[in-house]
Each structure stands twice: as C-alpha cells, then as structure tokens.
C-alpha cells in the first residue's frame, strides 16, 4: 500500500524551532515530488512548496519562502518541514502529499494523489 | 499567482440528487485543474485530475468538465458520504493555488 505517514501533533511556544516529518512507503520515494500544504484553522488549503527527494530540488511558494525550510532524506524515505522560529500564526494543520504525473498532450498533468494524515502544529505562549 | 474562485461557497442538497460546483481561474490554465474532497479535518482526497480524468477508485458519479478558465465538478446520485468540502486546484504554474472551497451539506 502506498502511504505517507506524518509525525505527531506538536505544541510549541513562539520562537521555538520545529521539524515535522513525512515518511513514504509502498513506492519508490526518491522519484516522486513531495509537497507540503497548510490549512489554517477553519480555512482552506495553501500550497507551501515541493521537493524532489532524489536530488533535493525544491520549489517554494513565495509566500512561504524564508519562513520554512523543506528538506528530504531519500535514504529514510522521509521529507521534512521545519521552522527556525515559530509564530502564533504558524498554528495550523500541515499535510504532505505525493505529486503524481500522468502523461498528457502537449504536456504532462500532475496532482497530489496520496496524502499524509496531517500534523497539527499549535504555537502558543 | 493564478487566482482560483469557486462558487458557491456552500450549498445544500439531498441524497440521490445532483449538484455542480464551478471553479474559475484568473487566467487560461488549459486542463491543468484538479478537484479534491475533504471531510471533517481529514486529509484531502484527489477526485479529478486534468479537469476531466478520474483516478482509480473514484466513483463514476463524480465528473469534471471545462478547460481554459471555467471548470465544473458534478456529483450525480449523491450519497451520504459525499457531503464534504470540495476544492479546485490549478497545476498550470507555481505557486499551485486552490479555490476557497465549497461546502456541500445535506
């Protein structure tokens, strides 16, 4: 079974650092892009960025660039999302998801076909 | 960034009925449009990719149409488990962007 399993809920104080994880199994992890999506409480979905685990090529949503760091370790089939200094506004549910590609004309199509269960991050003093 | 606008924000329907949700892109995205379903704080589920294609395992009562800037998700023969929030997403260019969501209620 193809799945992504995320690390557990976190409660942190403003200014603290945090690294959450997303481990893939059931497929060749290193050859599929992994994206991160934020969902603020009661709100919609926001795409934060994406990484290719095989070479750690990363693209960020400009809205999140400099605020978070996306990384991956292909040897452990794990992707990470980290903060160096959390803010209360980082309180949200964070999902990782695999990007699947389907052949198309004139170019391929892609979508997030497998999702992790989500990691709740609460930042409060 | 490409803006995605869904309508309506919420709608009510009955089991066995049919509903349509629309999604408009702020610029031409061809068929680079995906639909997701999210239930009660759970992870989103991919329903439609490339505007009209169903991934394996998605029931055929879900269908997608459109290209360019205007897209529609239609759900026929509504089942109780279809009551959820639906999001469109463009995959034409980074940053990928989602619509604000449409909540489907009984």
Image (cartoon, coloured by chain):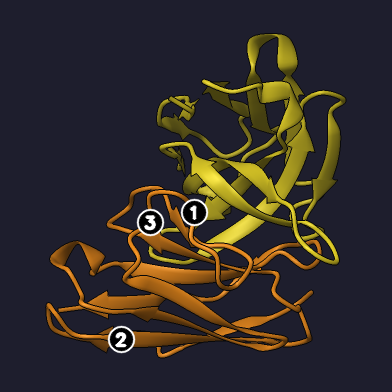
Chain colours: A yellow, B orange
Evaluate whether residue A9 shows in this view.
Answer: yes
Q: Residue at x 64, y 66 (%)?
A: B50
Number of residues whose C-alpha sits closer than 10 Å to that of mark 1, classed few (under 14), some (14–19) or many (20 or more): few
Image x and y of residue B29, in percent: 76, 78
Give me the chain letter of mark 2: B
Q: Can you tell which mark lies on residue B55?
A: 1
Evaluate whether residue B9 shows in this view.
Answer: no
Q: Is residue A62 above or below residue A94?
A: below
Mark 3 — residue?
B58
Tag nearer the camera, 3 or 2: 3
Image x and y of residue B41, in percent: 32, 52
- What is the secondary structure assignment of the residue under circle 2? strand
Q: Residue at x 34, y 49 (%)?
A: B42
1 and 3 marks on the same chain: yes
- What is the secondary structure assignment of the residue under circle 3? loop
2 and 1 marks on the same chain: yes
Give me the chain letter of mark 3: B
B8 sits left or right of A46 in the view:
left
Q: Residue at x 47, y 24 (%)?
A: A7
Q: Quadrant of residue B27?
A: bottom right
Q: Quadrant of the N terminus of chain B?
A: bottom right
Q: Nearer the viewer, residue A54 or A79?
A: A54
Image x and y of residue A83, in percent: 68, 35
Q: Is residue B85 above or below residue B17?
A: above
The answer to whether mark 1 and mark 3 are in CB contact below 8 A is yes
Q: Earlier in the sequence, mark 3 or mark 2?
A: 2
Q: How many marks?
A: 3
- What is the secondary structure assignment of the residue under circle 1? loop
Q: Nearer the viewer, residue B67 or B45?
A: B67
Q: Can you tell which mark lies on residue B19?
A: 2
Image x and y of residue A86, in percent: 62, 40
The answer to whether mark 2 and mark 1 are in CB contact below 8 A is no
């Amino acid at each position: 079974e193809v799945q992504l399993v995320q690390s557990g809920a976190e409660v942190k104080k403003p200014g603290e650092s945090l690294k959450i994880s997303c481990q893939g199994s059931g497929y060749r992890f290193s050859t599929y892009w992994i994206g991160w999506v934020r969902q603020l409480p009661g709100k919609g979905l926001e795409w934060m960025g994406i990484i290719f685990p095989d070479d750690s090529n990363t693209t960020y949503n400009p809205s999140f660039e400099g605020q978070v760091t996306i990384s991956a370790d292909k040897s452990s089939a794990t992707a990470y999302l980290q903060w160096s200094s959390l803010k209360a506004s980082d309180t949200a549910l964070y999902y990782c998801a695999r990007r699947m590609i389907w052949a198309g004309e004139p170019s391929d199509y892609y979508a997030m076909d497998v999702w992790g269960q989500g990691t709740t991050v609460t930042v409060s003093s | 960034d490409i803006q995605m606008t869904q309508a309506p924000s919420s709608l009510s329907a009955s089991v066995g009925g049919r509903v349509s949700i629309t999604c408009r892109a702020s610029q031409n995205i061809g068929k680079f449009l995906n639909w997701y379903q999210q239930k009660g704080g759970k992870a989103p589920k991919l329903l439609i990719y490339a505007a009209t294609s169903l991934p394996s395992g998605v029931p055929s009562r879900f269908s997608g149409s459109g290209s360019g800037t205007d897209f529609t998700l239609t759900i026929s023969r509504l089942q109780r488990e279809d009551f959820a929030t639906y999001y469109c997403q463009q995959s034409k260019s980074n940053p990928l962007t989602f619509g604000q969501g449409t909540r489907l209620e009984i």
